[in-house]
Image (cartoon, helix red, strand yellow):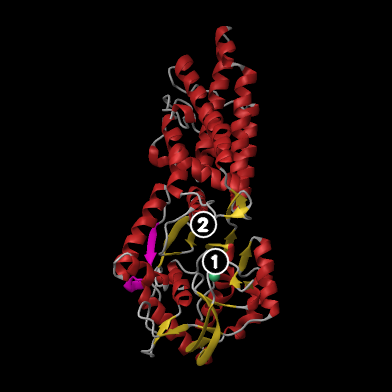
Amino acid sequence: MPKFYLTTAIDYSNGDPHLGHALEKVGADCIARYRRLRGDDVHFLMGMDEHSQAVIQAAEENGLSPQAWVDRMAATFESYWRRLECSHDDWIRTTEPRHHRTVKALLEQIARQSPDDLFVGEYEGLYCFGCEEFKQPSQIAGGHCIEHPTLELVPTRERNHFFRLTRYRDRLLALIRSGEFRVEPAIRRNEIVRLLEDGLQDISVSRNRQSWGIPFPGDGEQTVYVWFDALINYLSATGYPDGGYDRLWPADLHVVGKGITRFHCVIWPAMLLSAGVALPREVWAHGYVQWEGAKMSKSAGTAVSLGEAIDRHGPDALRYFLLREVGFEADGNFTWERFDERYTSDLADGLGNLASRSLAMLAKYREGVVPDVPADTPLDQAGRKAVAAYAAAMDALDLRGGAEAAWTLVGTANLYIQQIAPWALAKAGKEAELDAVLAALARALYRLAVMAAPFTPGKAQLLWQSLGLRAEALGGGWPGLEQPPVTGLSTTKPEVLFPKPHTV
Ligand SMILES: [Zn+2]
């Protein structure tokens, strides 16, 4: 079984999780679930970035210690991810001892392997506390950070430890251009290539006298810069530097937002090159969730509460909508109207209706038992075509394309029922033809349960069990997609998979 080590960005411990965080997490979870279906040995990591300076302020405002505050935030975030059915295997927090240990070990390894790469210098620049980063002129618009137009940039000057990032520009360019280190999608790769071509600067990797963070090895006055610290979480979770860490490492895929590609596609691989540790194979940078074409903002009244979005039609529907409509590549829009439309057309009237009428007819005409007719119908041909298109899209991390391919089969199957009118076959006593149609519908539902599982895991599981299949067998259902083994199954009518809003 090939291993597949997959990570998401770790989130700052301030504020509640919102739809933007959710898009990243359900997208990565969709990939993790798909890889498990294909038989990979998946290790899926999520977690929290807890050393940001904003933590100190938030903790004070809430009358808590920083540790008590981040404990509370971690519990809040993870409860949302569990509600959204995220199937992560590990949950890392940068305040954990295992992470502190790896940060120290990696810095010491850099100092051993590339002694010139860490040096002491003086830094002077404009600092954004939203990004926890000194901003370059190209990252500033109208005197403010592009990512945080409402925050003031703070002029800062201090003695720091620096990392010789400039040394890695040429190697990074070569690795990215050759595809040995993949940056996807292409629009993000091109941005990174341009950034590298424009040239790099050495970066400050410590902060002076910060009480909250990881002490810089060998310097009692300095704390490891929060980004340098945070990136290392991906390695900490493997047990580095202990032997056997390479059972998981290198990461096969880092899923991150498009705003932090410089950290993941330039600084992180440079740190690893410096330490002589293998590079991750791929970084995928998704776009942002927008509200009618603009970035969501609490102050502008266009922020959607994640809890409200989950409650609207349930977690499966939100996962489906984010990945099918908003998308996992470029920026995409979220509106309640579109969410309601998609819910009705694709889920309630689409997959839900197909499942309920197919299973109702099996119950009515065959006491729920799938007839033994392995015949090749037009619906089976459409099913195999959908599976092939689905796999091609999912392998390319085109999640929207994967959902589209699966739901094309939903439409075809619903149309097939309308055109064939099985109730007319029953009335005319055409039993053999009716058997063939009912068996073909059962095979379509089998294929759909498997393909829908990464997007709508809870409902896919319900459908799978309604087909009379063992709950745990869904994970290994992929090999059955060529000729779904449904003959003789005892199906049952499921509860309504996706109730119409007015019946909720
Ligand atoms: Zn910023």
Q: Is residue 163 above or below residue 316?
A: below
For ligand 1, the image quadrant comes to bottom right
Q: Which residue is mark 2?
A: 299
Q: Is residue 206 left or right of residue 202?
A: left
User: Whole-percent x and y of residue 257?
Assistant: 55, 62
The stretch of residues the image draws in magenta is 89-98
Q: Is mark 2 in CB contact (under 8 Å) with mark 1?
A: yes
Q: Is residue 365 above or below residue 502?
A: above
User: Whole-percent x and y of residue 298?
Assistant: 50, 55
Dot 1 amino acid type: Thr
Element assignment for label 1:
loop
Quarter assignment of residue 68: bottom left
Q: Which mark is residue 199?
A: none
Query: Which residue is pictured at 51% across the width and 81% down the height?
Result: 276
Task: Give the CA distance from mark 2 to mark 1.
Answer: 10 Å
Quarter assignment of residue 351: top right
Q: Which mark is residue 150?
A: 1
Q: Is residue 306 left or right of residue 384?
A: left
User: If the image is split into quadrants, where does the C terminus sit?
Assistant: top left
Name the residue furthest top.
Answer: 428
